[in-house]
Amino acid sequence: AERVEKLKEMVYHEKLGSLWERTERIEQLVLWLGQKLSVPEATLKAAQRAAILSKADLTTSMVGEFSELEGIMGREYALASGEAVEVAEAIAQQYHPRFAGDELPHTLPGTLLAIADKTDAIVGCFRAGLIPTGSEDPYALRRAALGILAIVLERNFSFELTELLEFAQSLYGKVEDTEAVRDFFWGRLKGLLSESGWPHGLVAAVLAAPSTNIPSLKARGEAIRKLIGEAQFRDLLVAYNRAANLAQKASGDAVDPDLFVETVEGDLWSAYGKAKAEVDLGLASSDWPRVLTALSTLKAPLDAFFDGVMVMAKEDAVRENRLAILRSIYQLFAAVADFRLLEV
């Protein structure tokens, strides 16, 4: 602990401050993660203590000469100075996974510290303009992003990635281009999902969803994947794609039932209301079979709607109202994935 103060004299990067400032950011990220994931107080305190001590071994001659021992020596020094075992282990685990196929952190304090350490490195480097290009990645940011994704998927950690990135950016003073960092993660996630056997269209459809909750995205993708080969699901997509294409012509999504001319309009609007209620409940509980079952109930009323009305009616109000119905349906599907991208 006495060595932490020496980190003020050690530059992390000329654009990103000292190692002491980096340690402070990592500590705040650990606390944010712990609170977001409802980590028990004792565990979170251990993770916070590990964060404070996480870079202290960089001040030693041993790590100065043998950089590959960072974290490993930190664990040994922590144990020698009387720190709790879980604190010492977390210090060593912060750098895991170090390479593809390496073991993930196996304790919760170590897991929180590993995510925090890698997140700060990625966000900091993006702010400093140190973004990987081509095969060049001197700060191993791709490996760091893959490490975070592997940990989050393994632990099934439920939080929005964009919220983590925005908080990490705020520790530098202000939130900047979160979308660029998110896209960097998505590039790595696309590779992971493709390697697991997902077809390209499914990967694109799921990652186009408004959510950045990684386990949630994987779960909904697996649910969709089970249905892709079924004829009923393909028929649903045919009707949905027709609705989605027309929905782009709508000027809004406000529907007025008083403007319904044909019975099938009211039937579709009623079916949409019931489906939306089910989808909302399914989204809230991550019950993806429930969500997809609810969406599938719209096939028959959609078919009847297209058979029974001319969507592009001459009357402006009637036409806009029908397009608004279709836009509402499009938005309901889009909350789950961009089904237009599926290859069926």
Image: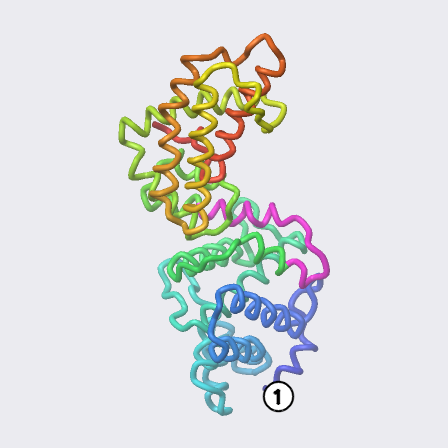
Tell me if residue 182 is in the magenta stretch.
yes
**Where on the picture, by quarter, is residue 202?**
top left
**The magenta stretch spans which residues?**
169-189
Mark 1 = which residue? 2
* Relative image position of residue 23 (x, y in whole percent): 61, 73
224 part of magenta stretch: no
State which quarter of the image contains the C terminus. Answer: top left
Which residue is most to the left?
230
Residue 328 located left or right of residue 343: right
In percent of width and height, residue 85 lies at 43, 84
The residue furthest front is 258
Residue at (63, 68) in percent of width and height: 25
Coloring scheme used: rainbow
Which SS does the magenta portion mostly show? helix
Residue drawn at 54 percent across, 47 percent down = 184
Q: Is residue 181 above or below residue 119?
A: above
The residue sitting at 62% across, 82% down in the picture is 4
**Can you say which quadrant of the picture contains the N terminus?**
bottom right
**Mark 1 crowdedness (10 Å alpha carbons): few <14, some 14-19, many ≥20:** few
Q: Nearer the viewer, residue 342 or 244?
A: 244
In front of the other: 99 or 168 = 168
Number of callouts: 1
Q: Position of residue 319 (x, y in %)?
A: 57, 15
Name the image quarter holding residue 201. top left
Does residue 84 lie above or below 122 as drawn? Answer: below
The amino acid type of the residue labelled 1 equals: Glu
Task: Residue 270 in the image: state x and y as whole percent.
Answer: 45, 29
Element class at badge 1 = loop
Q: Is residue 269 left or right of residue 166?
A: left
